[in-house]
Amino acid sequence: MQTAKFIAARAIMIAAGVMLASASATAATDFIDFETLADGVTPTTDQMVITNDYSNPPPPATYTGVTFSLSNGQNPRIAKVGTPATAFQGDANTQDPDCWPTISRDDMPQAAAQSLVECSFLTRDDPVGLPPDLIIDYDSPVTEAGGLLLDIDGPEVWEISAFLNLAPVGTVVTLTAADASFQDAAATPWSVSVPGGFDRLVVHYADATQRNVGLAFDKFYTNTLPAPIPTLSEWALIILGVLILGMMTYVTIRRRKAVQVSST
Ligand SMILES: [Ca+2]
Ligand SMILES: [Ca+2]
Ligand SMILES: [Ca+2]
């Protein structure tokens, strides 16, 4: 027969397990495809300004903790496939019947990329001139990230660098038209992996000879997006809560036993 102490100890272990599990719950690792906001339901709209939509969205959110910004102080925007062109001119001169009903080159991925890109991606504030850096900040460090960069053509050179606490961690991914197989409006995959973690990515346009370069960024993912590790004070609160719960359970069981003894 289980003693009151044994039952109380089990209650403490179960309570501790529940509390620790909730403290270390892992965040979602879905793609941010920019088709919807972070709730995975609300559709984005053309030229929608993105501020904290994926960093601190109202619940329910499938993806949080990621902030997109631009180095010129402006905010990135949603681009929709089709007219008007806010990111690039595709060369396919085709149409994607799911997204745009008529033939157009405006923000049009090549045919092979249309199912990857779907109808939406992220772009800069203004398609004219050299693009500012796209800065991606994480609330908590991650070890791997990746996505698609569209329409890397001509002399374009893009560099994607990782940082931790604003210090470069030595990883730079360079993408040129060669990586896009010289295909206009192609979607070029990229990924960054840093075992020690990083909390910022910078997508930088590194060629100064080209003007009016469009930024087109999509299908963004992180392989690990850990929840924040509780601080010392949070751990102290958790342990205190577990001890109080255990004490209450123990006292309740002792009282029940006392009542049972007195009633026999
Ligand atoms: Ca998309
Ligand atoms: Ca468009
Ligand atoms: Ca381009």
Image (cartoon, rainbow, N blue to C red):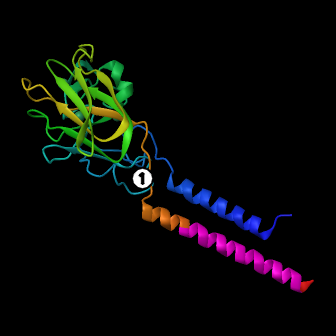
* Image coordinates for residue 171, horizontal then vertical, percent: 28, 30
| Left or right relative to 100: residue 91 | left
Q: Mark 1 points at which residue?
A: 228
Q: What residue type is labelled 1?
A: Pro
Which residue is pictured at 43% across the width and 45% down the height? 40
Count of marks placed on residues: 1
Q: Can residue 101 be seen in this view?
A: no
Label 1 CB sits under 8 Å from any ligand 1 atom: no
* Image coordinates for residue 30, horizontal then vertical, percent: 44, 39
Is disc 1 placed on a helix, strand or loop? loop
| Left or right relative to 249: residue 222 | left
Quarter of the image that includes the C terminus: bottom right
Q: Nearer the viewer, residue 6 or 143?
A: 6
Q: In this view, does 166 lie above or below 255?
A: above
* Image coordinates for residue 186, horizontal then vertical, percent: 28, 20
Residue at the limit of the structure toward the bottom, as seen here:
262
Which residues are the magenta region? 240-262
Rate crowding at label 1 as few (under 14), some (14 to 19) or many (20 or more) other CA atoms within 10 Å: some
Q: In this view, does 102 lie above or below 180?
A: below
**Residue 260 within the segment the image draws in magenta:** yes
Characterize the magenta stretch by its predominant secondary structure: helix
* Image coordinates for residue 207, horizontal then vertical, percent: 11, 25
**Residue 138 within the segment the image draws in magenta:** no
Q: Nearer the viewer, residue 262 or 27?
A: 262
Q: Nearer the viewer, residue 244 or 125?
A: 244
Tell me the quarter of the picture where residue 196 sits. top left
Quarter of the image that includes the N terminus: bottom right
Which residue is pictured at 38% across the width and 41% down the height? 142
Q: Is residue 203 visible?
A: yes
Which quarter holds ligand 2?
top left
Which residue is pictured at 14% across the width and 27% down the height? 206
